Amino acid sequence: MTLSLKDLITQALQDVVSALLADVEANKTPSVILTRPKQKEHGDYAVNIAMPLAGLLKQNPRQVAESILAKVQFPDAVESADIAGPGFINIKLKAGGESDIIKDILNQAEAYGCVDNSNSDRVNLEFVSANPTGPMHVGHGRGAVVGDSLANVMKARGYDVHKEYYINDAGTQIGVLANSVWLRMQELQGIDITFPDSAYPGDYIIEIAKEILEPNNFAHFEAMDETSRLKELGTLAVAANMAMIRSDLKQVGIEFDQYFSEKTLHESGKVTQLIEKLETDGLIYTGTLPPPKGKEVKNYNPIEQRLFRTTDFGDDVDRPLMKQDGTATYFAADIAYHADKFERGFKHMIDIWGADHGGYITRVQAAMKALTGLDKQPEVLLVQMVNLTRDGVPFKMSKRAGTFVTLSEVVEEVGKDAVRFNFMTRRIESQFDFDLEAAKAKDAENPVYYVQYAHARIHAVLRKAETEGIALAAINDVDTSLLVSDEANKLIKMLMSYPDMLQTAAERREPYRVATYIMQLAAAFHSFYHKNRVIMDDEALMQARLLLLRSTAQVIKNALSLLGVSAPEAM
């Protein structure tokens, strides 16, 4: 891959640093990091490498900076470099000096901003993992979009990402689901039933009951004993719900590499084997727990339990792995699941959970440290809630779901692109107010429309050039140094920053940065377009500006693709 001008300048400085340290014993060679000065008069790039070198060379930073500038061989695009303050080096480029980046963008196309790192560690990214007891609500949808976008961004920056969905198809909620479906099945036969508050409401339960009865005779289930009936109905209902969840995910363009069933952990004996291993390792003992923190419990009666010594590994209290009836706790199954990830070769795990699971992080990480020796694994990202409104008024609940608005309802109303882009415009730790009418608006206030319109406008200009008989010059034949206007320079700098932005988004697990970047890029394009005529008599300048527009469209398309959003060429 062709090195960018920034990379060439960095390498030139790094070569000098290595030369200056050739005769000096140093544990580590300081790395050159170029930054953009906040004030334009300070140049195009700044670097403070003289400061960390000063101690190693036993000179003051300004002397070191002078030595660097005396030896460095900058690329031709650099006009000058000077020293500021105690030893900062400011670098100024020639007019249009960075403009060749737009050729690199078009030559690299979809690969621009991406890196290939086939030797990277495998990362297990688990997200959504909604209980298979009903359709996905918009809160699940936000976590789904964040997880899928993060996977795309990390893959673009060379991570080997495996997307996984954990199906919670064991436990009491499956029994409640099975009973809810059985009650609706009886109701469909004309039997008078009492639907308890504990059962799952919503018309989707009736839909599942009808779906199960279609190939099966009601008498088949009626003749079964209750335990067998609920077990079979639980399996059938989970399958129906997971089909619905997969359909909901497909609506927003999300597919998983693997769906992992909690039920298989129990059936394979892995949960029991985990507990036995901890017993053998001396990490389980019989004891009692204090009353829950933050709650006043009257007449608290501590009960002896088999407890996992999680406090030895950073937890605030030891945790039970078995219930009073002898069955495993959810925590036991959860750590067995994460231990299974480790056994499958994943030493790096990222889980995306709802914000209400924040108190659960420490105990899982403590358990994983005890089992694998890994520290701070899994890495957990918490996603805050979504508040749905219509013209600022809270949106009513769904009849189909009973207690919440489903993701599919929102997608059907505003479209996949609006859902995915809007979910990415805020940090995940911030609650998000999603207004349905605003998401459908065709104006600059709607972020997805604003960005897609920029892409479509560029293609409109290209179509106009074609209708006027203007042939696009070969990429490498265009003189990009003619792009010297303030708006062109700002747009070019935005395009140059794309790879660094992606790297930051991947490292910090902040895919919202991609959406923020595209909105800023679209704004820079609109500013350029309003102040710089593109179709014009000056052939050389026109070709340079057309090339700039084409490279801008390419980056917008690349970035939107990472968010799972389309880039229309006409609107």
Image: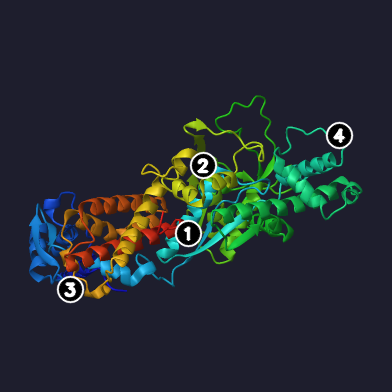
Query: Residue 408's x, y, as percent?
Result: 59, 47
Q: Residues within 10 Å of mark 3 (few under 14, many from 20)?
A: few
> Residues under labels 1 and 2: Cα distance?
20 Å
Crowd band around label 4 with a 10 angstrom C-alpha radius: few (<14), some (14–19), many (20+):
few
> Could you say which is closer to the camera, residue 260 or residue 59?
260
Amino acid type shown at disc 4: Asp
What whole-number distance in Å separates the C-alpha atoms at marks 4 and 2?
40 Å
Kindly report the distance in space between the C-alpha atoms of the residues bearing marks 4 and 1: 49 Å
Mark closer to the chain start, 1 or 3: 3
SS at mark 1 in the image: helix
Q: Which residue is mark 4?
A: 192
Q: Amino acid at mark 2?
A: Ala
Residue at numbered disc 1: 151
Q: Residue at x 8, y 59 (%)?
A: 82
Exactly how many numbered labels are in the figure?
4
12 in relation to 363, above or below? below
Disc assigned to residue 22: 3
> Mark 2 or mark 3: which comes first in sequence?
3
- Give the amino acid type for the residue marked by disc 1 in the picture: Ala
Q: Are discs 4 and 1 less than 8 Å apart at CB?
A: no
Query: Which residue occupies the extreme top position in the image?
Result: 298
Q: Quadrant of residue 189?
A: top right
> Which corner quadrant holds the N terminus?
bottom left
Q: Earlier in the sequence, mark 4 or mark 1?
A: 1
**Residue 291 in the figure: left or right of residue 146:** right
Cα gap from disc 2 to disc 3, whole angstroms: 51 Å
Q: Which residue is mark 2?
A: 355
Q: Nearer the viewer, mark 4 or mark 3?
A: 4
